[in-house]
Amino acid sequence: MSNEAKLELDGKTFTLPTLTGSENEKAVDISALRANTGYITIDDGYGNTGSCTSNITFIDGDKGILRYRGIPIEELAEKSNFVETAYLIIYGELPNHAQLKKFSDLFTENQYLHEDMKFHFQGFPGGAHPMAILSAMINAASCFDDDLMRWQWGRNKQFDIYVARLLSQVRTIAAYSYRKSKGLPLIYPKQSYKYTANFLHMLFSTPYEDFELKPEVVKALDLIFLLHADHEQNCSTSTVRMVASSQANLFASCAAGVCALWGPLHGGANQAVLEMLAQIHKEGDDGSKFITAAKDKNSGKKLMGFGHRVYKNHDPRAKIIKKACDEVLSKLHITDPLLDIAKKLEEAALKDPYFVERKLYPNVDFYSGIIMRAIGIPVEMFTVIFAIGRMPGWIANYKEIMEEPKSRIYRPRQIYTGKTINEFVPLDKRK
Ligand code: COA
């Protein structure tokens, strides 16, 4: 069977090459389409467009599969932790003892922000959203490094240090951004704490008393970071690649990813889930009225935490996190009316033909919000937690695009549907 595609246009037949990925995913290569035919393709929302080839993450949305560098997410969730998984995602292999130690040591060496950055934090108004502070401060952090300011891939020998600095400092910036938004004094990281424990310490300790680090709380948050660590060419990762394709530096590219993640249809969904549950609770609804509204296109409501562009089966991360959610709540002896509403919504939606026919299942955000609430993370920090978790994926995609010898600047086309040539009318003659 031919592995070329044939396209008939304007009475002529064109041949288009195809390619097959390592998991048998198939694509028609249209790179030369415009040059050969004068046509471009239109794919609103990029649902059928492969913007790159990538070795990092594999998703089969119909089967509910997610693997980082070939390793199933279920196995990583059970046997690994966020820092080790970050190494795997960025460098392609699980680290040995020496590599892991070096990676962790670099985190510790690079965790402190430049002292002058404190003045930048002070400039934000009290109500600033931590995602706005996070993206601005990641960009600002790059201004304190001459090499980053004169970034040129290949000339820069210190990529590993920048990787560790970004991964380590995103946590420091995230914690500071929250404390700033609450008018609380900044808490410095501790040398002896591991990644996730240190973040909780910077978030919740006071100058007088260290936050009590319950192992189940640290474990649950570390799991949330790990489950979010990469997810193929989603909105924020494509944004990072888009910015990186112009050869912008690592920090600038990832700061753009934070902005893309902020929206409620992407990373902001975990915050939106909690707000939805709180609203349902406040209105005395058990979820049934809300389900009816979510099915009505005119209501402006959606069942947040349900549906996914890629998963048309269970989101494998949602299964893992649902189990973790039950464990954390029972270990911490927490009963939460919002969790009861969430369970009712899930039960009702999974039986409802509207959701079944559209293959709308709970996604990772549906339960991560409930865990974060249980462990005391404030709602406005939910998307920031997602951003910390997603950083390894953004860095790995950045690295991949930089290492691709044939990489070109991303520059999609469009079909113009506006006015054709139009007359300029002087101001005093306009109606
Ligand atoms: N609640 C109610 N209806 C939903 C829905 C939801 N959460 N998600 C999708 N639908 C409906 C759409 O209205 C559409 O209905 P139609 O076929 O009658 O027009 C159908 O399901 C297909 O949805 P579509 O908009 O094509 O899906 P998408 O791939 O463009 O969007 C999401 C995917 C994730 C943006 C979308 O499901 C959503 O907004 N979910 C809620 C937000 C969320 O949880 N985001 C986190 C993603 S990890």
Image (tube, grey):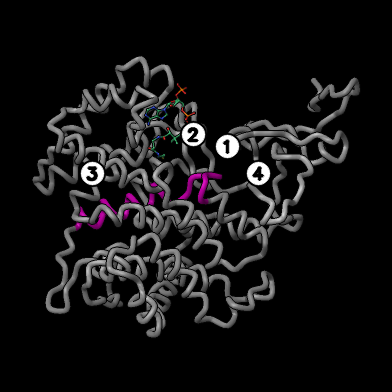
Contact between labelled residues 2 and 1, with CB atoms less than 8 Å apart: yes
Is the residue indicated by label 2 positioned so its CB lies within 8 Å of ligand 1?
Answer: yes
Q: Which comes sooner in the sequence, label 4 or label 3? A: 4
**Residue 370 has which mark?**
3
* Residue 274 placement, left or right of 410: left
Query: Quick one: SS at disc 2?
Result: loop
For disc 4, the marked residue is 51
Q: Residues within 10 Å of mark 4 (few under 14, many from 20)?
A: few
The response on whether ligand 1 sits within 8 Å of label 1 is yes
Q: Which stretch is magenta?
A: 215-236
Judging by the rendered image, the residue that carries numbered circle 2 is 309
Label 1 and label 2: CA atoms lie apart by 10 Å
**The quarter of the picture showing ligand 1:** top left
Give the residue type that dot 3 points to. Answer: Ile
Based on the picture, tell me whether residue 379 belongs to the magenta stretch. Answer: no
Q: Hey, what amino acid is under mark 1? A: Gly
What is the three-letter code of the residue carrying label 2? Arg
Q: Nearer the viewer, mark 1 or mark 2?
A: 1
